């Protein structure tokens, strides 16, 4: 039995009593990462496109029109480095081929200047000072728009993405936000866990404040006092009654950052508070009922800590009501312009942002970003300050970005050992320790990935998924 809906909606199939939405077919897409020297983000489906025309126009924008058996997509950019008719991408059999249309500054795929070449999955394409990324087989929802720009994304920085899989996670997070369900955010350092927690709180409808706690920065002998408060005279130095951070978050959201760093005694007290909905300040015989909602975040392997008896299994179960995993920045090349633009606009007036030279954009895209978006924030702040209102050039970059490796599209180019190790760790975090998924993403056989893991002393089991 099956049921159909109109337009682009999915067809439901029924197996027993459980309806299941048919998986959308993968389709080619073109992401705009940087446009005319400025960070930008857009996603264009090529599923129904025969040809893409790329050129310069002061007004910019995109337009779809009938052409041949499919549509023709025109992309225009306010890019002084781009020619008015710069490049064309044409469907040929099962491939898309990019051709230089006689441009002044050339067409580059990775670091190769090309006259004509077949685009491969994940290739980075540069026309003038506009950078794009081609994805050959990307699964998006049936009702996803053919063209999606950063202007259509949520206002909260922590929810902004063009990547379909991550976008689906964020949509689920928004739905969960208005419930009492705890949320556990997994991801490497600097990947935006606090920004996502802020977005969840903003969408929760809760009137109280968001109270962030860096569990790794709490003094071990004061953890319980900081979390749950104390009464005057409860211990040496307790000279007055003090409300704890848990109680301060009542009616709002308690954000436990680096929750894996909590010592075991504090874990037991936190578990009681979550189970009973009340806190007992140190030195008090009477607990106090509170309206408590918790978001926790960690870059650590909580399952491994549980197995080693360093994190309570029952507390983990309480915190992991809904788990969302944030990938490292190096795995979000398609979102790079969205993230960089959000950072830049938060720091200065968008109308005064300087342009970035092509060499700088190339260096930014090739950097492995071990500290993720946090490191990008520092780099952009430094460059913007040093350049003032002039064009940002490589002289405004820190030394570690001045000798960049290959662009993400150059899958077969030699990769420095430290960059390869960071890449593997990032992919293991993204795919929950699944070696086969890592190999597919890298375009390598599984045995090659296993050899690299052995060489670098990396245990895939340390990153196994909790979902």
Image: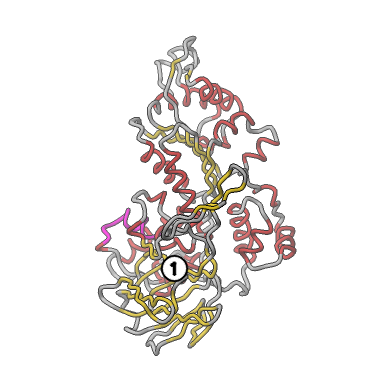
Q: Is residue 432 left or right of residue 52?
A: right
Identify the residue at the far front of this view: 1
- Residue at image position (39%, 90%) is 102
Magenta segment: 340-350
Q: Is residue 164 above or below residue 303?
A: below
Residue 343 among magenta residues: yes
Which residue is the site of mark 1? 45
Q: Is residue 197 left or right of residue 58?
A: right
Q: Is residue 272 above or below residue 233?
A: below
Q: Is residue 35 above or below residue 151?
A: below
In terms of depth relative to the viewer, which is nearer, 364 or 99?
Answer: 99
- Residue at image position (44%, 60%) is 335
The secondary structure making up most of the magenta span is helix
Residue 137, horizontal then vertical, whole percent: 54, 67
Q: Is residue 462 left or right of residue 1?
A: right
Residue 466, horizontal then vertical, whole percent: 62, 43
Q: Residue 396 falls in which quadrant of the image?
A: bottom left
Residue 107 among magenta residues: no
């Amino acid at each position: 039995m099956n049921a159909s809906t109109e337009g682009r909606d999915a067809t439901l199939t029924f197996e027993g009593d459980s309806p299941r939405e048919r998986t959308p077919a993968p389709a080619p897409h073109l992401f705009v990462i940087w446009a005319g020297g400025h960070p930008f983000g857009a996603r264009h489906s090529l599923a129904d496109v025969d040809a893409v025309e790329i050129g310069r126009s002061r007004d910019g924008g995109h337009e779809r029109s009938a052409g041949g058996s499919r549509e023709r997509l025109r992309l225009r950019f306010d890019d002084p480095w781009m020619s008015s008719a710069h490049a064309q991408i044409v469907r040929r059999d099962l491939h898309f081929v990019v051709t230089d249309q006689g441009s002044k500054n050339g067409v580059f795929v990775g670091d190769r200047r090309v006259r004509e070449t077949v685009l491969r999955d994940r290739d980075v394409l540069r026309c003038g000072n506009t950078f794009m990324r081609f994805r050959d087989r990307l699964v998006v929802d049936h009702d996803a728009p053919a063209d999606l720009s950063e202007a259509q994304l949520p206002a909260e920085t922590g929810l902004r993405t063009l990547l379909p899989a991550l976008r689906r996670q964020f949509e689920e997070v928004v739905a969960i936000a208005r419930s009492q369900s705890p949320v556990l955010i997994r991801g490497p350092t600097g990947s935006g866990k606090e920004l996502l927690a802020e977005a969840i709180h903003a969408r929760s409808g809760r009137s109280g404040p968001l109270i962030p706690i860096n569990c790794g920065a709490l003094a071990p002998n004061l953890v319980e006092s900081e979390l749950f408060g104390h009464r005057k005279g409860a211990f040496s130095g307790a000279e007055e009654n003090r409300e704890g951070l848990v109680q301060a978050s009542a009616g709002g959201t308690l954000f436990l950052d680096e929750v894996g760093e909590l010592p075991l005694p504090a874990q037991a007290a936190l578990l009681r508070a979550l189970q009973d909905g009340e806190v007992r300040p140190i030195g008090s015989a009477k607990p106090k009922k509170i309206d408590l909602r918790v978001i926790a975040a960690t870059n650590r392997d909580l399952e491994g800590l549980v197995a080693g008896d360093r994190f309570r299994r029952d507390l983990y179960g309480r915190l992991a009501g809904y788990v969302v995993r944030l990938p490292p920045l190096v795995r979000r090349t398609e979102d790079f312009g969205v993230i960089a633009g959000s950072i830049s606009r938060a720091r200065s007036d968008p109308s005064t942002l300087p342009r970035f030279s092509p060499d700088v954009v190339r260096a930014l895209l090739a950097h492995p970003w071990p500290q993720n978006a946090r490191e990008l924030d520092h780099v952009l702040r430094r460059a913007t300050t040093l350049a003032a209102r002039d064009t940002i050039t490589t002289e405004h970059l820190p030394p570690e970005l001045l000798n960049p490796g290959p662009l993400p599209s150059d899958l077969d180019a030699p990769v420095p050992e430290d960059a390869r190790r960071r890449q593997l760790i990032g992919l293991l975090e993204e795919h929950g320790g699944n070696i086969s998924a890592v190999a597919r993403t890298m375009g390598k056989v599984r045995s090659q990935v296993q050899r690299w893991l052995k060489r670098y002393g990396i245990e895939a089991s340390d990153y196994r998924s909790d979902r």
